[in-house]
């Protein structure tokens, strides 16, 4: 999955989407990554990875990061191009 756009679920750092740069055991580096703080319009992360969100205005995805190191990754889900476009198209959420 290296070089692919993925969703990563971690044990304690939440869910992130981005391009998989590297993986070493449970340590994952993503580039062009967004935290999936809250999503709507998909019943699960699996559906989000395949179809994207049908309610982008209800999602809360903060700004993207150039790179992030995630520890304790417990799930890496490859995304379709449709899902990637949907996730990247969600407006930046800020408080």
Image (cartoon, rainbow, N blue to C red):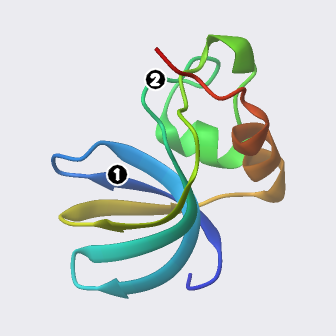
| Residue 61, placed above or below residue 28 | above
Secondary structure beneath dot 1 equals strand
Mark 1 or 2, nearer chain start: 1
Whether residue 72 is visible, yes or no, is yes
In this rendering, position of residue 69 left or right of residue 65: left
- Residue located 65% across and 75% down the image: 4
**Tag 2's secondary structure?**
loop
- At a point 34% along the width and 51% down the height, the residue shown is 9
Split into 4 quadrants, where in the image is the N terminus? bottom right
At a point 83% along the width and 48% down the height, the residue shown is 82
Residue named by callout 1: 9
Label 1 vs label 2, nearer the camera: 2
Q: Nearer the viewer, residue 47 or 4?
A: 4
Residue 75 higher or lower than 82, as above or below: below
Would residue 55 be visible to someone looking at this image? no
Place of residue 26 in the rendered image (x, y in percent of width and height, measured from the top left): 22, 75
Residues tagged 1 and 2 counted as in contact (Cβ below 8 A): no
Q: Which residue is mark 2?
A: 38
Picture coordinates of residue 62, whole percent (x, y): 53, 33
């Amino acid at each position: 999955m290296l070089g692919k756009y993925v969703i990563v679920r971690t044990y304690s750092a939440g869910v992130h989407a981005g391009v998989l740069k590297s993986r070493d055991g449970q340590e994952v580096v993503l580039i062009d990554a967004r935290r999936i703080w809250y999503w709507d319009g998909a019943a699960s992360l699996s559906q989000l990875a395949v179809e994207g969100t049908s309610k982008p205005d209800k999602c809360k995805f903060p700004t993207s990061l150039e790179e992030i190191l995630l520890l304790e990754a417990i799930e890496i889900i490859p995304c379709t191009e449709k899902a990637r476009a949907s996730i990247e198209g969600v407006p930046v959420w800020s408080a």
